[in-house]
Image (cartoon, rainbow, N blue to C red):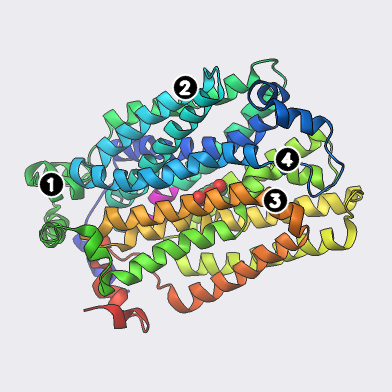
Amino acid sequence: MVDTEKHEQNFPSKLTVYVVVCWILAAFGGLMFGYDIGISGGVTAMDDFLIHFFPTVHERKLHAEENNYCKYDDRYLQLFTSSLYLAALVSSFGASEVCTKFGRKTTILVASVLFLSGAAMSAGAQNIWMLIIGRILLGLGVGFGNEAVPLFLSEIAPVERRGAVNILFQFFVTIGIFFANLVNYGTSKMHPYGWRVSLGLAGVPALFLFIGSIVITETPTSLIERGNETAGHITLRKIRGVDNVNAEFEQIKAASEIASQVKHPYKKLMKRSSMPPLIIAILLQVFQQLTGINAIMFYAPVLFQTVGFKNDASLLSAVITGIVNVISTLVSIFAVDKVGRRILLLQACVQMFISQAAIGAILLAFLSTTGSLTKLQAAIVVGLVCLFVMSFAWSWGPLGWLIPSETFPLETRTAGFAFAVSSNMFFTFLIAQAFLSMLCNMRAFIFFFFAGWILKMGLFVYFLLPETKNVPIDLMAERVWKQHPVWKKFMD
Ligand code: BGC
């Protein structure tokens, strides 16, 4: 603690308008990701869309057997939703190369161009292939954006505000999801091409990101790492708003000298001493998905219909959870650099466990295969879903991205973060692909399944996750890993 305070004095900084503009513009990458998460559930529920691309699914929907837990189970529709995440999984590794060789700014530019073309292709799709190519382009964009934006934000933020600045990414993700839900609500009444509007509007945040990628600065770390020391020094002065940045500059220079000796980051990443941040980055992302959050983000309207809401009421309930998601993220922006990462994660485990287990218990006790819940029971389920989303939004949502972006040393940072992004994408894919089938087969027990994982992740945080609040990125090894009772055994 004392060390950190001393360190903060060494790294003076003032807020400037330019740096805040950079944070916000880069965070539009999060808005794109959120929009893509939020839009597909509503679009695949639109009859016009189904008739155009999935006529057999539409036919089946008309004659669906009335089983609460199974009526929406369809492999092909799930594949449409989840294909984006497979593309993102693959592209995050390419993005890590681009990020190291050409910088964070260029990687964000590439992401925005991919998003723009993906939005145009899917909105204008004449056949299923165009639709799928559109999804793949968007997925490639997510891989590039999610790799570069959290790293960009963590590197450009002053240490004492790093958590808050990085969480702007997640804040924009939640706005993107919410915005997509509202758009779907409006376009579902526009026949026959409402779905084109939904898919095409992704172009708006993509355009902001494109403009942003031109306006924003490169991070000093990336400039110095690529040999542009003078530009790095000038940029550091510009974003810190003060002239005396020598101490921070020297620290980044030292980190990049070490990094320049590592020719094969992936080989280095497989070394024992790289295991602590790597294991933590992967597990945080895997656990983030095993909370069950995307069962709700992708399928909230379906879930609410399952418990007996009519179409409009269930869309409205999805909008309510969307608002809760956005507002609760603000809590973590304010709390993360004060109370720290661990407290937020642990508190949320308790709240998420209780809400998932309670939802499971209510459905098990009161929802038969063909009946529905009473109004009161259904309202309690919506309340519990809100409690769940709220705690996710101030913990595992933002911190799943923040912690992996702040714990790798420079030499393995982009490669290590690519593992975080791809683990997220793989498990998002699995949930998107499997949830409706799991709901059909496991019924109410699916909520106990998620609750069981939440218990495990609580133990993981308690025993294995060190606190990283206020520790400069380039001093993680000394101050965090080498001090931790388990992880210090991995360090050279
Ligand atoms: C997760 C997404 C999730 C979103 C919900 C993000 O951090 O990566 O999978 O849908 O949070 O707000």
Q: Is residue 14 magenta?
A: no
Marks 2/1: CA–CA distance: 35 Å
Q: Earlier in the sequence, mark 4 or mark 2?
A: 2
Residue at 66% of width from left, 57% of height from top?
Answer: 388
Helix, strand or loop at disc 3?
helix
Q: Position of residue 405 (x, y in %)?
A: 35, 56
Residue at numbered disc 3: 437
Instruction: Determine the secondary structure under disc 2.
Output: helix
Identify the residue under disc 4.
301
Q: Amino acid at mark 4?
A: Pro
Counting labels gives: 4
Q: Main secondary structure of the magenta part?
A: helix
Q: Which of the numbered marks, if any, corresponds to residue 226?
A: 1
Q: Residues within 10 Å of mark 3 (few under 14, many from 20)?
A: many
Q: Earlier in the sequence, mark 4 or mark 3?
A: 4
Amino acid type, mark 2? Met
Cα–Cα span, label 3 and label 2? 29 Å
The answer to whether residue 8 is visible is no
Task: Decide which of 346, 111 is in the foreground and name it.
Answer: 111
User: Badge 2 local density, few (<14 within 10 Å), some, or many (20+)?
Assistant: many
